[in-house]
Image: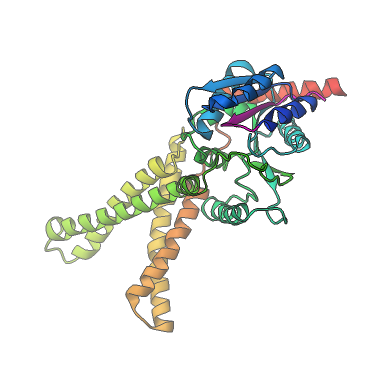
Amino acid sequence: METNAVIVIPALNPPLSLVQYVGSLVDCGFSRIIVVNDGSRTDKLPVFMKLKRLGAVVIDHDMNRGQGASLRTGFQYYMEHFQGDSDGVITLNADRQIYPEDVQKVASSLHNEQAMGSFALVVGTRDLNGKLVGDYDYRMGGVMKLLYHMLMGVRLNDPLSGVFGIPDLRIRQCLDIEGDGFAYVTSLTMSFEKIGFLQVPIEYVLYEPGVERTFRKVADTIRILYTIFKKFILYSITSVGASILDVIMFSIFTGITFRGSPFVIIYSTVCARLISASANYLLTKHFVFHFKSDSAQGNTKSAGAFMILSAAQCICSALVVSAMKALFGGNVVGIKVLVDTTLFFVSYKIQHKYIFKDDKKKEAPELEEQKKLAQQHAQESRIQEG
């Protein structure tokens, strides 16, 4: 059965079995396959020659540039040759080859999603609780699953599979994602958090014995974790910076501006908080969540919600600290640190999910037009099949 999706496979010093694997994909109907030779050794050139004979497009990097760079190279070739004439791209791994039947499942789901007008990321999801699952995949998969849920509110059962079905209309978005290594895959996944995911079960596959693994457990794990925490780290920095600004402005107002006034503390507190909260809003909006709104109403709404949240956070802190001090006693400073830390995480979740949430209804005009054309094409295809 001919499949409309295009397959992209980054390959660094791939095993000879990749030739047989690509051949099996061709037999399953995948006639458009892009393999990116990411600076492999010269002794691996026969592998790529055989792949060309099978009809695969082989693109060479003159040096090793990483998983992310290889995927972008494949996406760029797709944009130049297949965009608008395909359901999208399916990404696979050269050193960990999932079964062709599972690739067909991903391709089918990718096609069906777009036929229904949905452009979510299709994620090949392995069962990480099986007997064959390695220790690293089991532990890291659990950690990643928890982090995605805690920091982004996304429930992904297998964020590390690397098997994606990316809709045709979203390939350009993937070209704009930064990163060259395996952390790029994490960034790609995170870029779809507000668009959506469709998880498709696939079989867990072990590495072929003796295969050269391109994933470096320590270095790549650190980069992946940094990618996930980067937004939260920036959020923490902007919050701390706003707190420092608040103290500085409070000192200026009490020592100079409102000095001698009977309400010096009240005036100074309110004015300092307004300035620090405004600075915090702008930094959080532009540098943490990269929130964009075309309308003044959207910006005003987010600013108002941010200020209300800041005020509610202060009031809640004061009330909870007072209540816990009265009920349990203890050091008030220690209680405040515990309460404010909890509110810090809660505030992050609220800002991420509600205040700086992109408006899905407002997309680039060209993307909206492409969506209409894709849906029209899918409808015509259904009529012809019927």
Q: Measured from the top left, where is residue 121 in percent x and y? A: 64, 37
Image spot of residue 274 (x, y percent) = 30, 53
Q: Image point 48% across, 30% down: which residue?
A: 65
Q: Which residues are magenta?
A: 1-15
Magenta region includes residue 333:
no
Residue at 42 percent of width and 42 percent of height: 300
Q: Position of residue 352 (x, y in %)?
A: 49, 49
For the point 47% across and 26% down, which residue is it? 63
Q: Position of residue 228 (x, y in %)?
A: 49, 48
Compared to residue 362, the image places residue 233 above or below, namely below
Q: Is residue 386 above or below residue 161?
A: above
Secondary structure of the magenta portion, mostly? loop
Q: Nearer the viewer, residue 377 or 214?
A: 214
Q: Is residue 17 visible?
A: yes
Color style of the picture: rainbow
| Residue 364 visible | no
Q: Is residue 3 magenta?
A: yes
Measuring 43% from the left and 36% from the top, which residue is drawn there? 296
Give the vertical position of 379 relative to 343 (above or below).
above
Q: Choose top left, top right, bottom left or bottom right for residue 342.
A: bottom left
Specify the farthest residue to the right.
386
